[in-house]
Structure formats: C-alpha cells, structure tokens
Image (cartoon, grey):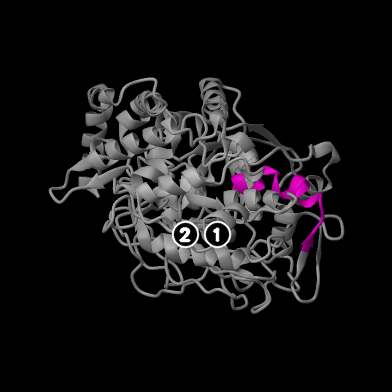
C-alpha cells in the first residue's frame, strides 16, 4: 500500500476530524461531548488533494467532494503528530449521544451489497440482534453477499458481466490502484462498467453538494482522490478510508521476546535470516514465517522494501517511471527470499493457504513467529484473537531495517484507503436513499451509532461505564464487528480498541516508526487504460512466475525474461499511460 510523493512528514499540523456543529446539519451535537474522528490528510505532491485541512472546507479541483471537518470533541490521549497520523484514545468517550436525529435514512425496502470477506463470518442475520437493530434504525433490510477474498475477483467479474446487480458493490483497490506494493492494478474493465452500469454520484456529492451528507463530507480528500473515485469528469465511488501505514513484519511478542530479545531489531538481511533460523522449529510444528497464495511470499510488499526497491513505481529525476521489479534491488530481494524458502524457514502450507484468513489462523495459533501483516483493522483482528490463546499472544510490528549495513530503512506507505463502493444505476430518489444510509454508516466515532455499528447493543454486546471503560462480551465481534458495515463506509480512522489493553499506545508508537520511514507510490490517483485492461493478467503472470522462482520450481535465471515478458505484454504501455496522466496533472 502506498500514498503520494512525500516520504516524510513535514510540519506539525494537528487538524482533527471533529463533529459537525449546529442545526444546519440537522444534528443534535454538543461541543465537548463527542470524540473527534481523525484520519491522515493529504501530503503535498502529484496525488495530494488541493488545499489544506486546516481550513473549514476546501474547494475541490474537479468533481471531488468538498472536505468539511467535523467539529467538537474531547482531547485525545494520543494527539495526531500531523497529516499522516491519527488521534488515539485509551478509553471510549463517556456519555455518547445520538448523532442521527433525522428521520430514518431508509424507506423500508431491501438494500443488497456485494462485499469482500476481510473478516471471519459474522452471526447470520436471523440470530443477530445487533444486525437487526442496525436495519431497524436504518429502516432498511440490508443484506450482504460476503465472498471470501480468494474468490472475490471471479465473483465480481461475474456480477459485472450480468444485469442483475446489487445496490452496492465493493471494488478492492478502487479504480486502478495496486494495494500491497506491486499488486494487480484494480478491477479489469472497471471504468467502462462505472460509466455504463453505475450511478453518477456527482450531482449528489461533488463540491458542496456533499454537505447534505455531513458524515461523508468528513472523509478526507486524499481518500477520494487516491482511490480513483472520480473518473472522466464524474464521481462514481465512495472510498473506505484507512491508515497510511502499510504492511510490516509483526512479531509474536511472547515467542520473539523470549527467544530473540524484547527490543531486538535485525541489523540487516543476513541478521534477519539468523533470527529466522533461531525461531524455526519444524520438529515442534513451528516455523519462522509464512505466506499465502498470490502473494509471491511478500517479496513485493515487505522484503523488497528492505532491499530499497520502489513502492510499486519510482519517479526518476528525468520524469520517467521505473517498475519495482525492473530494479536490481527487487531482484536481490527475490534471490534472498528464495534462499529463505530453500532453508525451510517458511511454513510448508504457505503455497496452500487460500487467503489471508487461512494463514492468519496459524499465525494466531503460534505456528510461525514473524509474519507480514497489515496495520489497523488486520492488526486488531489477529491481536484480539491471540489474546484468547493460552497463554495469550500479543503482536507488534518490528521497526523497518535495511538489507545492508549503512542502508536506509524503508516502509511502503499506503494510499489511505482500502477499497471503494459504487451504486448500481437507479432513480434519484433511490440514490439519495442509499446515500443517506451511507451517511448513517459513517457516523462519527464516539456516538451511539458508532457503538452500535462497531460493538453492538448495550448490556448484550458491551458495557460502557462512567470512566469510559468499554467491556465487550463474547458476542460483540461475531454480531457487530464482523458484519461488513465498515466495508461499506466508515468514519475516518482513529486509534482505539476497547478489548485490547494498550492497543492505542502500541499503534501510536508504531505509526511514529513506520510513517517517518515511509516511501510512496507516485501513481496513486492516476489512471492507465492498459493497466485496467491488462494489469491484473500480466501482474498475475508475474506473481506466478516469482512464486515459482522463490519456491525453486524455476531457476533464478528466468527472472530477467519474466520482467521482459511483463514489459512486452503491456508493462511498457502501462508505464507510458501513467506518465502521460502524470504530465496532465
């Protein structure tokens, strides 16, 4: 995951996403009662949004919505250090009030949503009181079709090819974005699909029009821009804003600290291999690390960063773009990971885990110790599950380190979003209804709506005391958190998790290590037709080839031809189109 051209934070802006004041929004909001919502604001550079978040609003350069920060809220325990950081809280804000004081957003009908299975399955609707209460407050029968990540591209392509579309559709990576440093290039043929079968949201959300949906207006501009929500002069999608920190090596604290050392960070690639070897105990069914299918052993996400390769693309001083695997640093990373695999340091199921959830189960179970995982929601999920082990497991990321002595530590930053959602074409009244529902689902952190969506029902799923201690029951995750509300839309990210002691501080500390070492991708927010049409296919061929080389099924000597094939089958054209798009901006 990546953001724009800025590598390090500049300045000390402390703008917050606050709660909207006043009757103009039709909300009964009291200053100082609700908690602030926070998300990183766009750094300067080719993909940064115009304007500054310090202003009450910013005028979009094109069809992007006006950013209107929410007002009010108590002081966070861990204030944001700047644009790419979040505010954090140890305790939930006390006396949360009801943010939605208008009529229910829905009209009583059914709303269908096709979405990705980022989390384990939730409790089915029929026996899920939290889901039922959300639908009651929405006055809508929201039904999710949740598809596991490994099957989602095929399912999405099938749905897009037909005419029986769901109301809401999730697109991993947005318009044309590589999530995870060298990933596939968005959803094939998405621009054509958006223009022919999806609702044009421009009349409802562009510019100041979004002020009719104040919680959506609080989503920062960079999330809309970097996800490609606008295309060809129209706005088609709504982003799922997320942290800018990307994937990193997470350690099982209980094992790593006891056997390697609490504060030990590998000095270089050779030292990491030594650490892996010390952690590797195949005879005990415990391995140093792991991967899962279609990841090429994380060479493009984590290992190549260690070797100094670009985050997907690199903008050279002459204005040309270089793809990550065209560099000698990336090739060195491939050779290094191949050596790790040959040494038996990867869990033997690494080529068989079907998706991230399958691999995560064994990470949580202590089957491997150092493993690339995601910041934010993924971290919360596997840490939470680790606490249920006996003894409980804790997980924190290692600081970045270079492959060679004297090198510069790198961390691949993300674009500040994870996916987008689009609507199928419908009447203006239906589009407005769906937008009202989306606005409700983006209710600010610290409200009764936020509590319901994230944690469930009081006394059934959680208890909130007068000091802000939020205690969850065993049903909370299954009934509330695992329902895919946050993958339709959500308020800007904050650092708060009630059932993981010390999480906000750990995340705060991690951000202040990962973000300063951040490297960005210069093509976020740019569109290449060839990448949309061919990117997934040629990238999949590349990933398959890298997987075979690393797993020893093909010689390393095949690497150069693999890169040459990528260039000749579309890579060079993709490069040209990105460069042309960059020149226009």
Indicate whether 456 appears above or below 546.
below
Residue at x-position 62% and y-position 77%: 74
In the rendered structure, are the residues bearing label 2 and label 1 in contact, judged by CB atoms less than 8 Å apart? yes
Name the residue nearer the viewer: 284 or 325: 284
Q: What span is colored magenta in the figure?
A: 471-489
Q: Is residue 103 magenta?
A: no
Classify 10 Å Cα crowding around label 2: few (below 14), some (14-19), many (20 and above): many
| Residue 458 left/right relative to 504 | right
Of all residues, the one furthest to the left in this rendering is 318
Q: Is residue 482 magenta?
A: yes
Q: In the image, residue 502 lies at what x, y percent?
A: 64, 66
CA gap, disc 2 and disc 1? 8 Å
Dividing the picture into quarters, in which one does residue 110 lie? top right
Figure label count = 2
Q: Is residue 84 visible in this depiction of the protein?
A: no
Indicate whether 63 appears above or below 531.
below
Indicate whether 73 appears above or below 242.
below
* SS at badge 2: loop
Q: In the image, residue 373 lies at what x, y percent?
A: 52, 46
Q: In the image, residue 345 lies at what x, y percent?
A: 48, 37
Name the residue carrying label 1. Answer: 492
Residue at x-position 74% and y-position 38%: 109
Disc on res. 266:
none
* SS at badge 1: loop
Name the residue nearer the viewer: 460 or 107: 460
Q: Is residue 31 visible in this depiction of the protein?
A: yes
Give the mark nearest the N terminus, 2 or 1. Answer: 2
| Residue 231 left/right relative to 283 | left
Q: In the image, residue 11 lies at what x, y percent?
A: 35, 74
Name the residue nearer the viewer: 484 or 443: 484
Classify 10 Å Cα crowding around label 1: few (below 14), some (14-19), many (20 and above): many
Name the residue carrying label 2. Answer: 220
């Amino acid at each position: 995951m990546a953001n724009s051209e800025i590598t390090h934070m500049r300045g000390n802006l402390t703008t917050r996403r606050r709660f909207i004041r006043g009757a103009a929004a039709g909300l009964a909001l009291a200053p100082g009662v609700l908690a602030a919502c926070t998300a990183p604001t766009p750094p300067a550079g080719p993909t940064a949004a115009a304007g500054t978040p310090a202003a009450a609003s910013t005028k979009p350069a094109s069809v992007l919505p006006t950013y209107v920060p929410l007002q009010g809220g108590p002081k966070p325990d861990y204030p944001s250090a700047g644009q790419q950081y979040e505010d954090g809280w140890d305790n939930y804000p006390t006396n949360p009030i009801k943010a939605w004081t208008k009529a229910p957003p829905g009209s009583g009908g059914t709303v269908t949503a096709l979405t990705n299975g980022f989390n384990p399955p939730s409790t089915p609707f029929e026996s899920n009181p939290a889901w039922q209460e959300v639908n009651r407050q929405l006055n809508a029968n929201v039904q999710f079709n949740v598809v596991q990540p490994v099957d989602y591209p095929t399912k999405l392509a099938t749905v897009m090819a037909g005419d029986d579309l769901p109301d809401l559709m999730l697109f991993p990576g947005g318009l044309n974005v590589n999530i995870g440093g060298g990933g596939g290039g968005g959803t094939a043929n998405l621009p054509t699909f958006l223009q022919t079968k999806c609702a044009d949201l421009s009349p409802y959300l562009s510019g100041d029009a979004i002020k009719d949906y104040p919680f959506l207006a609080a989503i920062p501009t960079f999330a809309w821009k970097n996800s490609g929500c606008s295309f060809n002069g129209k706005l088609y999608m709504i982003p799922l804003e997320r942290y800018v920190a990307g994937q990193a090596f997470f350690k099982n604290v209980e094992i790593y600290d006891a056997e390697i050392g609490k504060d030990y960070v590998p000095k270089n690639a050779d030292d990491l291999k030594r650490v892996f070897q010390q952690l590797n105990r195949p005879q005990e069914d415990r391995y140093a690390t792991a991967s899962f299918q279609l990841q090429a052993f994380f060479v493009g996400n984590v290992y190549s960063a260690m070797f100094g390769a670009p985050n997907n693309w690199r903008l050279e001083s002459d204005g040309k773009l270089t793809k990550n695997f065209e560099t000698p640093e990336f090739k060195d990373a491939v050779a290094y990971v191949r050596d790790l695999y040959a040494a038996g340091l990867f869990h033997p199921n690494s080529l068989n885990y079907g998706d991230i959830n399958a691999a995560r189960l064994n990470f949580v179970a202590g089957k491997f110790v150092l493993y690339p995982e995601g910041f934010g929601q993924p971290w919360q999920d596997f840490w939470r599950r680790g606490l249920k082990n006996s003894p409980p497991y804790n997980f924190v990321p290692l600081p970045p380190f270079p492959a060679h002595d004297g090198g510069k530590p790198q961390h691949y930053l993300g674009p500040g979003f994870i996916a987008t959602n689009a609507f199928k074409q419908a009447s203006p009244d239906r589009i407005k209804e769906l937008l009202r529902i989306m606005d409700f689902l983006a209710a600010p952190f610290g409200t009764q709506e936020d509590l319901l969506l994230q944690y469930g029902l009081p006394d059934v799923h959680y208890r909130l005391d007068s000091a802000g201690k939020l205690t969850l029951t065993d049903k909370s995750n299954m009934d509330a958190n695992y329902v895919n509300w946050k993958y339709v839309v959500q308020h800007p990210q904050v650092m708060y998790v009630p059932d993981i002691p010390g999480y906000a501080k750990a995340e705060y500390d991690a951000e202040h290590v990962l973000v300063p070492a951040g490297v960005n991708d210069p093509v976020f927010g740019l569109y290449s037709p060839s990448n949309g049409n061919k990117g997934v296919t040629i990238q999949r061929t590349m990933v398959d080839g890298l997987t075979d080389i690393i797993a020893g099924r093909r010689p390393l000597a095949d690497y150069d031809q693999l890169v040459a094939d990528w260039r000749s089958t579309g890579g060079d054209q993709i490069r040209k189109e990105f460069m042309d798009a960059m020149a226009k901006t």
